[in-house]
Amino acid sequence: MDDHYVRVFHSLARDTRRSYGIELPIDVEQYVVMLLADHMDRPDWMPESSFAESYMLIRNSHDAKVLGDECLFLCGVFPDYGRRNGLDVDYYAAIGSGSYSRASRTLHRELFDQLSRNFTVVSQFINSTVRGVVL
């Protein structure tokens, strides 16, 4: 992950917080910054199978975290993605929230529990952060 991306997204997140008044716990905001920076150099971040199938195939907390991250990135950066297939952002948000809930059982319990419970707000924060930024 490029440190330049981390600095840029940190600055954009700060601007989002100031402009839109969306306050996230600092650990969640930092997670969002790292998630966005990490995805800048990952053109193949979508799950290999469908989101639903990937959810059904979760074997451990790491799998759950990865799928949660994929859903959060999709909902925040590409909220209109599923519309052509008759799916809306709520479909992916439910899978992402459920994935983070499963991850919270063993990984950074408080962080992933917050991501699960506040998935929609976090994805809206991401959308506000990247709006106008060419990814």
Image (cartoon, rainbow, N blue to C red):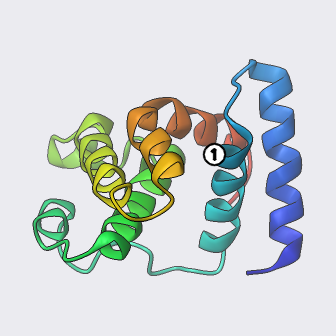
The residue at the point 31 percent across, 74 percent down is 63
The picture quadrant where one finds residue 15 is: top right
Which residue is located at x 41 percent, y 63 percent? Answer: 70
- 28 or 39, which lies in front? 28
Please say whether residue 130 is visible from this viewpoint: no
Secondary structure under tag 1 reads helix
Image quarter (top left, top right, bottom left or bottom right) of the C terminus: bottom right
- Side (left or right) of 68 relative to 7: left
The quarter of the rendered structure image containing the N terminus is: bottom right
Three-letter residue code for mark 1: Val
- Horizontally, residue 118 falls left or right of residue 133, namely left
Closest to the observer: 117 or 127? 117
Q: Position of residue 49 (x, y in %)?
A: 18, 76
Relative height, residue 26 to residue 60 (above, below): above
Identify the residue at horizontal 75%, vertical 18% (top origin): 21
Q: What residue is disc 1 on? A: 28
Task: Tell me if 7 is positioned left or right of 135 in this view.
Answer: right
